[in-house]
Amino acid sequence: MGAHPLQGRRIAVTRADQQLGSARSLFEQAGAEVLDLPALVIGPPDEWGPLDDALSELDDFHWLLFSSSNGVDAVEQRLQAQGSGLAERPSSLKIAAVGRKTAARLEELGAAADFVPPHFVADSLIEHFPVSGWGLRLLIPRVQSGGRTVLAEAFAEAGARVVEVAAYESRCPESLPAITAAALEAGSIDAITFSSGKTVLHTAQLLEQHFGARWRDLLAPVQLVSIGPQTSRSCEAVLGRVDQEADPHDLEGLVAACAAALRG
């Protein structure tokens, strides 16, 4: 693979509207022309009460589990409003983080994770967790709707007491960017990358809203590339296929998977 494996390729990247930057720069370094397809708008949950209540009782928890940097940002924001922050958390409270980006965000805040699983998926966190779950109290801040409760279920089965609270919500944007819609119409997009199940769902909604019943036909020549197993399942269910899956399940892996899909 050369230095620019995506040279001359047009890649549409589905990320939250405020998270396109890091993905864009990695794809551009690989030679791609990046088209924005923001499929998520990250905002506050409908109410802050449950999160605020949980954060006021941090002394009662053994572990705080983050599966996204959005959760980290939301918790830090609410703690700041209470006059503290993750860096000033109780010494008895440990932090676990799924994913390189989540761990990096915690480090930036001076609250480095005590445990990061070797693979950037939730299953890996459960499998490699450093202590027995029995009797532990865990706090899991997550997306309000369609959040992944596999973590909560697995820890509950292991005998932990789990509190899951809505820390943020990811909603569908109003519409497709005109440039991206025109490129899809013209058949000039080589691949679309998906970074979560919700980005798959919202992309399908946006395409149907814009193109009507023929939206699936426009996807036929496009390689569909997923960041990991959960997202791949959503691609299969909503779009009928997935052409390549990133490994490792992060942005670097996504760039490599795109290159592999387009070579194949």
Image: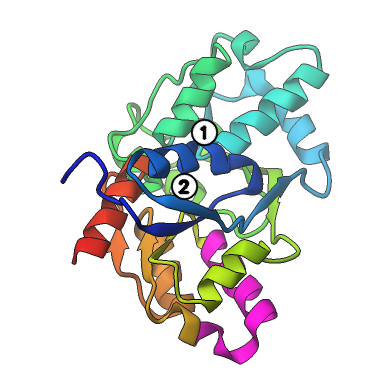
Taking depth in this image into account, of 85 and 135 the one nearest to the observer is: 85
Counting labels gives 2
- Residue 205 is a magenta residue: yes
Q: Quadrant of the C terminus?
A: bottom left
Q: Residue at x 76, y 18 (%)?
A: 80
143 left or right, relative to 127: right
The stretch of residues the image draws in magenta is 198-216
Using the rendered image of the protein, determine whether residue 56 is visible from the camera's viewpoint. no
**Which residue is under mark 1?**
65
Q: Amino acid at mark 2?
A: Leu
Please say if 201 is above or below 102.
Answer: below
Q: Residue at x 46, y 47 (%)?
A: 151
* Label 2, residues with CA under 10 Å away: few <14, some 14-19, many ≥20: some
SS of the residue at dot 1? strand
Q: Position of residue 65 (x, y in %)?
A: 52, 33
- Residue 99 is a magenta residue: no
Is label 2 in contact with label 1 (beta carbons under 8 Å)?
A: yes
